[in-house]
Amino acid sequence: MNQLLSVPSQVGLVLRAVRKSAKLSQKQLAAKLGLSQNRMSELETDPGSMRVDQLLAILSALGLELQVQTRGGSPAAGTEGGASPPTVSKVEW
């Protein structure tokens, strides 16, 4: 999946769509992340309230990754061929 995001509300829509396509309920995804179903709902409806580490944890749980690139499609300088990013082990919600 490749999705261009330009406003925060789109993040919630993408997270919801991917969660549903993975046949996961909010409760199931929340359990993987150590969250309540209510908090998972809040993150989908108001993604602007989420920190970057929380976003990365959710993306990882959904099998997604975040890629930053310059407009027009080229990866950002210094990101090609580098080491794998560290895995988030614990996120404070």
Image (cartoon, rainbow, N blue to C red):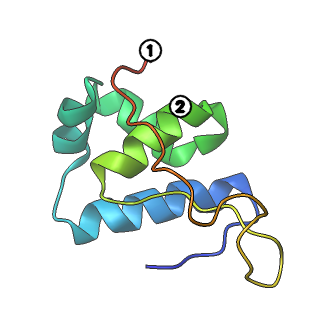
Query: What is the total number of numbered labels drawn onto the structure image?
Result: 2
On screen, residue 36 versus residue 75, left or right, reads left
Q: Are marks 2 and 1 in contact (CB under 8 Å)?
A: yes
User: Type of residue at label 1?
Assistant: Glu
Q: Nearer the viewer, residue 67 or 21?
A: 67
Q: Tell me the quarter of the image containing the C terminus.
A: top left
Label annotation for residue 92 = 1
What residue is drawn where x is 59% and y is 41%? 46
Q: Is residue 20 left or right of residue 43?
A: left
Q: Is residue 14 above or below residue 90?
A: below
Q: Quadrant of residue 34?
A: top left
Q: Amino acid at mark 2?
A: Asp
Element at label 2? helix
User: Which residue is disc 2 drawn over?
Assistant: 53
Q: Position of residue 15 (x, y in %)?
A: 43, 57
The residue shown at (48%, 44%) is 85
Residue 7 location in percent, x, y?
75, 59
Residue ranking furthest to the bottom: 72
Which class describes the residues within 10 Å of circle 2: few (<14), some (14-19), or many (20+)?
some
Residue positioned 54% across, 57% down in the render: 66
User: In this picture, is 43 found above or below 72?
Assistant: above
| Real-space CA distance between mark 2 and mark 1, rounded to the nearest whole angstrom | 9 Å
Q: Earlier in the sequence, mark 2 or mark 1?
A: 2
Label 1 environment density (alpha carbons within 10 Å; few <14, some 14–19, many ≥20) = few
